[in-house]
Image (spheres, rainbow, N blue to C red):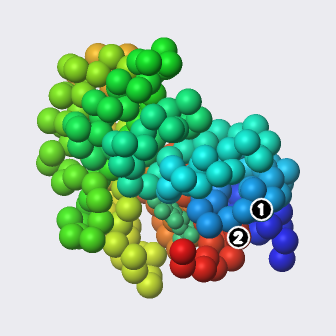
Amino acid sequence: MSIAEKYNEALQKKNAAAVRSGRAPEDVILMAVTKTRTADELNQVIDAGATDIGENKVQEVMEKYDKVKPVRWHLIGHLQTNKVKNIVDKVVMIHSVASFHLAKEINKRSAAIDKVMDVLIEVNSAMEETKTGIAAEDVKALAEEIAAECDNIRICGIMCIPPRCENPEDARLHFRNAKALFEEMKGWGLPEDKVNPTVLSMGMSNDYEVAIEEGSTIVRVGSSIFGPRNVR
Ligand SMILES: *Cc1c(COP(=O)(O)O)cnc(C)c1O
């Protein structure tokens, strides 16, 4: 199958899961995760209709940015503070904020270009040592700190990456917990221009339908669209 065919197949599944969850298809975004893929492959998925692209490395955004048709870029992987300056002008959202230290740098670099950056707080729902993200119980304190100090950041919700499991049903509880935290966030009473929870980023190739059933608003799908990745 071509990239366009696989993208469309994922789109159909995404739409069906959105309807199963009582929402309209357009209420859930299918993001194409393009790490390790070429600019040509990105253009193929954009031609097929993709509106949102996710990269996990700053370097890859910089390499491909000028070779790719207009699209909404998201940074979804671990972000080092010294690289923030290279992407604040390119991405519409940073999904992986897990420290005040990083938020401060995003704030500073966004202020320098007169931008308010949309970010998500990355929650490590299983508290796995190998993963980034913060514990669910620490999200409120971080959100409060960012809201108080960072005028050029708007927190739009949460990203969650549950442990990889063979059976997507095993991820359901993690997704449900992330959704509960996301709903809680709406009641924290933080200023709406600073914290406006509308985005729940969860679900990857093997579990995105379950994630949507549990309330995801944007799924990050790579290998189901582009095929297996060579490790790089
Ligand atoms: C690679 C990656 C994805 C996509 O993974 P697939 O299993 O290929 O769909 C989603 N989210 C993040 C943060 C990633 O790094």
Identity of the residue drawn at 41% across and 26% down: 109
Identified by mark 2, the residue type is: Phe
Identified by mark 1, the residue type is: Glu
Beta carbon of the mark 2 residue lies under 8 A of ligand 1: yes
Left or right of residue 198, residue 195 in this image: left
Residue 14 pos. (x, y %): 64, 58
User: Does residue 218 lie above or below 150 as drawn?
Assistant: below
Identity of the residue drawn at 81% across and 59% down: 40
Q: Distance between the residues labelled 2 and 1?
A: 8 Å
Residue 167 pos. (x, y %): 44, 82
Q: What element carries label 2?
A: helix
Residue 205 pos. (x, y %): 56, 69
Q: Is residue 36 visible?
A: yes
Identity of the residue drawn at 19% across and 54% down: 135
Q: Which mark is residue 198?
A: none
Identity of the residue drawn at 51% across and 50% down: 58
Q: Are marks 2 and 1 in contact (CB under 8 Å)?
A: yes
Q: Residues within 10 Å of mark 2 (few under 14, many from 20)?
A: many
Residue linked to disc 1:
41
Left or right of residue 165, residue 72 in this image: right
